[in-house]
Amino acid sequence: MSRSLWLMIARVKLLFFLLPERLLRFCLAFGFILLRMCSNASVITVQLGSLGQADKPQIHLLPCEIEHDGPAEVSRYFTPTVKDHKNEMSVSFRGRGLKGAEINCPQGYTGLVLKEDNKAASDQEDRTVRISSVFHRFTYWNLETKPNSDDGVVMAMTWPALAEAVSVC
Amino acid sequence: MDLSEFEADNSVSCRLASAVPDVCRSEDCCLGIDEAGRGPVLGPMVYGICFCPVSKKDDLKDFKVADSKTLTEDERETLFLKLDEAKDFVGWALQILSPNTISTSMLRRAKYNLNALSHDAAIGLVQYALDSGVQLKEVFVDTVGPAEKYQEKLSQRFPGVEVTVRPKADSLFPIVSAASICAKVARDHAVKSWKFRENLGDVDTDYGSGYPNDPKTKSWLLKYLDPVFGYPQFVRFSWSTAQTLLESKSMTVHWDDDKEDGEKAASRQKCASVLSYFGRSKPQGTAREPHRYFSERKLQTLDML
Amino acid sequence: MSHKKKRSPNTHNDTWVVVAADSAVEAPRRKDGDPLLVQLRNPCTGVASLYMFGSDDAHLYEVKAFNEDCHSWFIGQTVHRDGRLLYITPVDPLYHLLPYLIKVAKEGKFQLLQQMVIDEDFPVCSRLLNCKETKASLGLVAEEKEVAGQKFYRYSQEKTMEWLKKKVDKTVKALKNSNISVGGGVKSTTYIRVNQECDFCEEDYLRYAHGLISEYISEDLSKDLLKHLQLPEVLSPNEAEPPSKKRKVSDKPVEAGEDYTKFNSTDFARKPPKKMTAAQKSLAKVDKTGMKIMSAFFSPKAKTEKLPLGWQLWEVSDSTNASPQLLQSQGS
């Protein structure tokens, strides 16, 4: 950030010799606007201090998209109707039969729910997210068929292990 | 009527049955089939069979059984007790289809409609009687749909049994009346003593008849509508009454098998790439396709949170 | 029973479900050492992608999203519409340093890292220098010289190829230990996979691993690596097109002048194609800076406005039915 600023000032100095003043002013103003935008808008701080207050809720991944963000009476309507007989989990949602399985986070990985409390009013503001929840496993629900190794999310869970090989020395 | 077996898990289908009288295993028998609770948007649908030796048909008439709909609740209760006490020559069996079974069957990916569901319940009960050693010669069935096809289906399924499928069979054949009484009593009990698996606290049980056009039923459906979950499992989600209410008063839910015409699907996809928030948009300027490891796992690069 | 339902756009997302490497969220030692989600230039595509500097900038992580249609979450007593699952996994910062090193390689000079790793579009890239791996393993892709206690580096293609080959070997090993199907390419989603590891040949593994590593390097490096692995190039229908000219242009060394102009990369892939005066260049730079960042942040409505040429190219690349020529000219 400070380096870029220095760079910008240095460039402005150079331009001073080459450009008419009006153009220079334009460059200066425009440059600073852009600098603000690119340097601030693209940085989001993850507040680790929030980890202490994070809750450990039950997490379910559903096979449907619910057009809603907010409260849901999960413990009244959903959890009491979940059946778990001999590793066969089932429930219904909106009259449709679901079959479920527990999915664990890979070794060395933790599930986090990141929450942005005050979504920046403009792109110029710094953004922060806090860790609102922590989880180590979640229940994955499939529509009518038992979750299996060909399901997208089950396959995607192989990524962290492979990422270590692909990415790390 | 003891429904405890069903009440132990009222989210699934359950079979209840009397003991099979010895005489039914040695003598030619007739069997009636009827259903209760086909129309209501609430509670289970019950299929019932009643059977007795052909020679005892007149004894059954003496009970003064009649179409359950023409009887009061008390009369039905009394008649059921009489039938249940006639253990020496009358047997019965019930298939209780929970509202959750009805919802999840009818809304299944590969649709399983109410007629198919009903026929399968009836066939299952007849098979149960046969498996129990009942010497079936005559089967009488009440139907709401076209009788001929159903009769053909049952005759083929049970060769050697004379099948009669007839509208209003419950008022024509006493053995069908007896079956309809068993079914109706079970349905009434199940609704009256419904144990909500959901944590709803004290639930208002003033459901009315359960038929969609009953104002009491309607106001109950409004009162217990949850914007996310819709209804408790007591409600048949597959009924158009419930669907219409959910469409107007609850959060929209999309399933991957929702029907969309091609044009709409295309415009939605366009919508998704252009209008959705940035984190969802595809990385820009990618000339190379992502490796299939990632595309097969629906793993995408993000450009912003 | 299912009806045609219009899907409303999800515009106000403020919650993300993430599976993160534990090391990324270790308690920071520095006061301001909290992890940072940032945009860096994707070394494969050249455009902005989301990454994370872990606590105290110790390691770099990439962010990928499992994004399948029709999912939502229940989190405790809430419903969360966005059914994506984000993965925060470690990524070698060297992948990100390489393009900067390569960019100045033609000058043939040894340079300070902080002189090379400068990007006005992504000023945050200077944090890459804080990562532990950077100090520990830069020598794997560059020649080192130490003068007066300062380390100077020069990109080495040979070293880089060896380094990448090791990555491929490691990936092959990991693939063999997994149930990942590496053979045959496209498989239908309904295809039931049986464990047929032994049916895959060494080349299948090698190509698959090369494909994965190629997600982290430029197309040129990817092709060089293929040669280095002694794998013949297989032309897919897409690749049969003439290669992008842009990249070649970008390989030209920027004219030497003042120190800072030398490092003023706006893009690895795109450069003004014509000779320009310093002033024009500065303006062009300004334009592009805006274009990149804005295209990532502005609402689509802004896109209907009249835009400079660069913008239009971005527009095209954003829509899936763009003609291949336009995509090509935009560069990879």
Image (cartoon, rainbow, N blue to C red):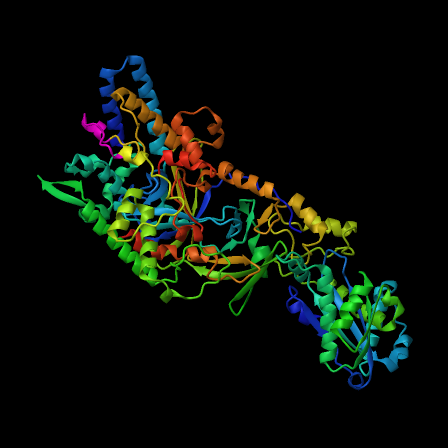
Q: Residue at x 58, y 48 (%)?
A: B254
Residue B253: image location, x then y, percent: 59, 48
Q: Is residue C262 magenta?
A: yes
Total labels drawn: 0
Residue B149 quadrant: bottom right
In front of the other: C257 or C116:
C257
- Residue occupying the far left of the picture: C148
Q: Is A33 left, or right, of B194 in this rendering?
A: left
Residue B93: image location, x then y, percent: 75, 74
In front of the other: B22 or A168:
A168
Q: Is B80 left, or right, of A104 in this rendering?
A: right
Look at the magenta stretch and give its main secondary structure: loop
In front of the other: B285 or A89:
B285
Q: Residue at x 22, y 46 (%)?
A: C134
In front of the other: C177 or C37:
C177
Q: Is residue B132 magenta?
A: no
| Quarter of the rendering occupied by the N terminus of chain A | top left
Rendered position, C65 above or below A144: above
Residue B92 quadrant: bottom right
Rendered position, C287 above or below B18: above
Judge whether residue C119 can be spotted in this image.
no
Q: Residue at x 53, y 41 (%)?
A: B269
Residue A26 quadrant: top left
Q: Is C5 left, or right, of B275 in this rendering?
A: right
Q: Residue at x 49, y 56 (%)?
A: C189
Rendered position, B262 above or below A146: above
Judge whether residue A84 can be spotted in this image.
yes
Residue A10: image location, x then y, percent: 23, 24
Residue B114: image location, x then y, percent: 72, 60
| Residue span colored magenta | C251-263
Rendered position, A50 above or below B79: above
